[in-house]
Amino acid sequence: MKVSERMTKEPVTVEASATVKEVAEKMRKENIGTVLVEENGRLKGIVTDRQIATKVVAAGKDPAKARVSEIMTENPVTGSPDMEMEDVTKIMGEMGYRRIPIVEGERLVGIISTADIVEHARTCNTCMGNIFNEVAKAQR
């Protein structure tokens, strides 16, 4: 099965100039913990609720003044829509990632998460093993 068959095709995005407060509000509204940072349709980074908590809130910074570009992970590991599910789950398992942005050329086209993969993983032993590796790393 290809990643394109399971990925979220319209991921939530912001521009790098957005404030951390704007990103947090978007996360709350969309009920998500990860937002992709893009510029002109190109992926620039990824920001998580954990980064907001540790790099802004715990550091005593003002979320209304801090920019997402200050805390995002730049140039994140990506996948492509034509990748096999086994390959993307291997990356997730080896790297301990729960989400991978999906790009085609330089254009952002989606995101895939462990939640997107669960149904497929039930019938794919390789994918299930890769996901278990990811979960084990997250618990360390």
Image (cartoon, rainbow, N blue to C red):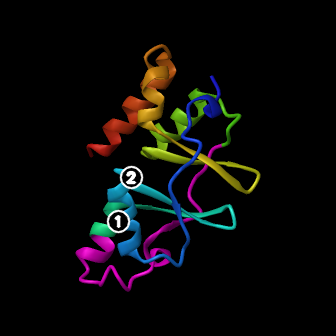
The N terminus - image quarter = top right
Question: For residue 78: magenta?
Answer: yes
The part of the image, by quadrant, that contains residue 5 is top right
Disc 2 marks which residue? 30
Question: For residue 65: magenta?
Answer: yes
Q: Amino acid at mark 1?
A: Glu
Q: Position of residue 119 (x, y in %)?
A: 44, 22
The residue shown at (39%, 82%) is 66
By secondary structure, the bulk of the magenta-drawn segment is best described as: loop
The residue shown at (27%, 67%) is 53
Q: Position of residue 39 (x, y in %)?
A: 64, 69
Is 19 placed above or below 41 here?
below
The residue shown at (32%, 61%) is 50
Is 63 placed above or below 15 here?
below
Q: Residues within 10 Å of mark 2 (few under 14, many from 20)?
A: few
Q: Which mark is residue 4?
A: none
Give the residue at the far top of this rendering.
123
Tell me the distance, in whole angstroms, between the alpha carbons under discs 1 and 2. 9 Å
Q: Amino acid at mark 2?
A: Glu
Disc on the earlier residue, 1 or 2: 1
Q: Horizontal placement of 111 versus 27: left or right?
A: right
Q: Nearer the viewer, residue 123 or 16?
A: 16
Disc 1 marks which residue? 25
Q: Position of residue 32 (x, y in %)?
A: 37, 51
The residue shown at (63%, 44%) is 79
Q: Give the extent of the magenta segment.
A: 54-79
Q: Nearer the viewer, residue 102 or 124?
A: 102
Q: Position of residue 34 (x, y in %)?
A: 42, 55
